[in-house]
């Protein structure tokens, strides 16, 4: 069952094409990555899905219906910019968002207590929102997004302000919701999290989809010739264009793209001559690399 379908959706602001002919479909129970650089059109696409703004052309179906009016209670939306009221108490905030979604108050109080405990905010339930740290506020906003048990959840940068422990906490909740049949659209700049959570992605740039499909297939098509190398010494061979097309130095290791016609074993042989190797690995290119390469390629032909 398709929870969401966009067909040839367009949106412009004066002379700026925010979204151009965007087509995608998302199946029930999936975690879908909606990706793109700043200004790519992600927020405009999300706002059209939510019915906050309307497309100039094209169609959007949510649960098979074009009207958003009767679908809002089935959707949860966590925006990148927080929408909390600083003077309200934490519990009152959650109950307020639940009431907006037409939830029973008694049941909402029980559910809120459960979520506050799970996300380690229980002792803050009677505190004002403004007294919470940035990470705590992000967890509160997340609870407000899911308190009404939505069938479709849209998360725009859900890990903003979270330390690694709380990032893992939210990640586990997302996966539990997905296993329960909830459909999740996940928009973020953290490619590592996308790789861990999403089976399908759509990468948009300047309003257009430049890459979409199953992440495993996208990686397969990108090739498996990427080399991860960790070493001690002076790796002069990295600057040999006959051997190395390009490389990214991450301090603790480098990722290498061999020059055309060069096999990884040839890189290894030259590396052995010059440095002491602590790691040599051939792997799929990272999503971060695919992201950068795809955007650069698109912009070079425009």
Image (tube, rainbow, N blue to C red):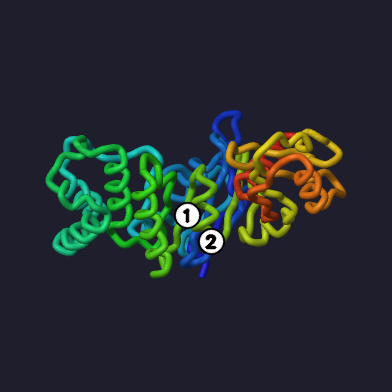
Mark toward the start of the polypeptide (2 vs 1) = 2
Q: Residue furthest left?
A: 126
CA neighbours of label 1 inside 10 A, class few (<14), some (14 to 19), many (20+): many
| Front residue of 238 and 132 | 238
x and y percentages locating residue 271 in the rendered image: 76, 44
| Front residue of 195 and 245 | 245
60 to the left or right of 140 = right
Task: Tell me what residue is drawn at x 59 percent, y 56 percent.
Answer: 24
76 to the left or right of 229 = left
Task: Tell me what residue is drawn at x 64 percent, y 50 percent.
Answer: 279
Q: Is residue 149 above or below residue 55?
A: below
Disc 2 and disc 1: Cα gap in Å? 9 Å
| Front residue of 140 and 6 | 140
x and y percentages locating residue 196 in the rendered image: 51, 57
Q: Which residue is mark 2?
A: 26
Task: Tell me what residue is drawn at x 76 percent, y 40 percent.
Answer: 274
Q: Residue furthest top?
A: 15
x and y percentages locating residue 142 in the rendered image: 32, 50
CA neighbours of label 2 inside 10 A, class few (<14), some (14 to 19), many (20+): many
The answer to whether residue 262 is seen in the rendering is yes
Discs 2, 1 touching: Cβ within 8 Å: yes
Q: Assign the C terminus to one quadrant of the image.
A: top right
Report which quarter residue 184 is drawn in. bottom left
**Secondary structure at numbered mark 2:** strand
Check residue 185 in the rendering and tell me which mark sits there, or answer none: 1
């Amino acid at each position: 069952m398709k929870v969401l379908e966009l067909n040839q959706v367009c949106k412009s602001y004066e002379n700026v094409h925010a979204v151009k002919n965007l087509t995608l479909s998302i199946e029930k129970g999936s975690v879908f990555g909606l990706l793109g650089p700043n200004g790519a059109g992600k927020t405009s696409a999300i706002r059209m899905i939510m019915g906050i703004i309307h497309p100039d052309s094209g169609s959007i179906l949510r649960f098979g219906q074009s009207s958003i009016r009767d679908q809002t209670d089935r959707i949860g939306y966590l925006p990148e910019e927080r929408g909390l009221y600083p003077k309200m108490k934490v519990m009152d905030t959650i109950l307020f968002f639940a009431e907006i979604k037409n939830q029973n108050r008694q049941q909402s109080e029980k559910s809120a207590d459960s979520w506050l405990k799970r996300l380690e905010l229980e002792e803050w339930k009677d505190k004002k929102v403004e007294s919470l740290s940035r990470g705590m506020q992000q967890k509160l906003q997340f609870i407000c997004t899911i308190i009404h048990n939505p069938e479709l959840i849209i998360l725009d940068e859900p890990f903003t302000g979270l330390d690694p422990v709380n990032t893992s906490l939210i990640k586990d909740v997302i996966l539990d919701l997905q296993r329960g049949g909830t459909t999740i659209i996940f928009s973020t700049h953290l490619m590592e999290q996308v790789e861990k959570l999403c089976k399908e992605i759509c990468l948009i740039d300047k309003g257009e989809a430049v890459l979409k499909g199953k992440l495993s297939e996208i990686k397969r098509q990108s090739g498996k010739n990427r080399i991860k190398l960790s070493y001690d010494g002076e790796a002069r061979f990295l600057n040999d264009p006959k051997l190395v097309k390009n490389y990214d130095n991450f301090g603790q290791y480098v990722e290498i793209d061999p020059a055309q016609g060069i096999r990884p074993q040839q890189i290894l042989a030259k590396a052995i001559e010059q440095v002491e190797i602590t790691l040599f690995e051939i792997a799929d290119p990272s999503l971060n690399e695919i992201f950068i390469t795809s955007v650069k390629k698109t912009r070079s032909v425009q």
